[in-house]
Image (cartoon, rainbow, N blue to C red):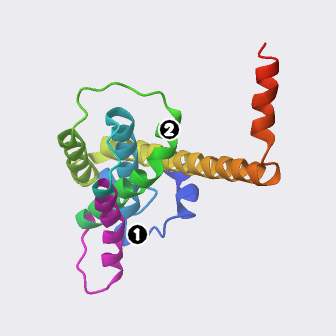
Amino acid sequence: MYKLLLPIFSAVCGENPQHVWSPGGQPLPCCQRCAGLYVGALVATALHLWLRPRISKGFLQLHALFLLQLGLFVFPYVPTSPVLRSISGSLFGFGVVAFLAPAILDWCPPISVSLLSARVYVAGLAGCLGLVPAAAEWGGRPGALVLMCLVLAGAVVLAALACANLARCFLAFASRLSRIINPLAPARVRARWRQNPG
């Protein structure tokens, strides 16, 4: 599985050998930070679909900080470790999903969930922050397989979110363009429907 995934992830990850988890001697196809990012994005998407958190200004500001924290690690004087790299990646994944998820949530039918709670969301975030380092450190070869599957699923989820947002932007642009080109078209359609509703 590693040999199949390596060329895919090498296009988007530097794969520094010193920054790659190798649970049970099996290296992951991406670095520690990217592994955290993909698993974080997967968990965050699942939480958004399940809990449907209210996207408030404070929620977006907090998740914007999750995005910005990654910039701290650009500076060479900030100490890093494998665990910190995974945690920063997971936080970044949660931040990305907070800004991309509304595109898919608009298309999904609403679910009435009684557990719509910040506590559940925070518990999911906290669990995710420890998931990648724990599976990498103590998971052995089964942990490597689980992490590879989670990383791959997270990459697919991020790609789907990006495509959904691109489609949403395209549809909004096309709608606005049609209103500019033919501003009377919606009124004509409504007038025709009133004349002949069947």
Residue at image position (35%, 33%) is 50
| Residue 25 pos. (x, y %) | 34, 55
Residue appearing at x 47%, y 51% in the figure: 100
Q: Position of residue 8 (x, y in %)?
A: 57, 56
- Residue closest to the far bottom: 77
Type of amino acid under label 2: Asp
Q: Residue at x 31, y 62 (%)?
A: 61
Q: Is residue 135 above or below residue 10?
A: above
**Whether residue 29 is visible:** yes
Quarter residue 34 falls in? bottom left
Residue with the mark numbered 2: 106
* Residue 116 falls left or right of residue 145: left
The image quadrant of residue 81 is: bottom left
Query: Quadrant location of the C terminus?
Result: top right
* Dot 2 alpha-carbon crowd within 10 angstroms: few under 14, some 14 to 19, many 20 or more: few
State the residue in front, 153 or 20.
153
Q: Which mark is residue 139?
A: none
**Stretch in magenta:** 59-82
Name the residue nearer the viewer: 80 or 197: 197
CA–CA distance between discs 1 and 2? 40 Å
- Examine the structure image and report whether residue 105 is included in the region drawn in magenta: no
Q: What secondary structure is found at the residue carrying circle 1? A: helix
Residue under the point 28% across and 47% down? 140
Q: Position of residue 116 (x, y in %)?
A: 25, 34
Tag on residue 17?
A: 1
Query: For the residue carrying disc 1, how many other residues have a C-alpha within 10 Å: few (<14), some (14-19), or many (20+)?
Result: few
CB atoms at circles 1 and 2 under 8 Å apart? no
Q: How many marks?
A: 2
10 or 111, which lies in front? 111
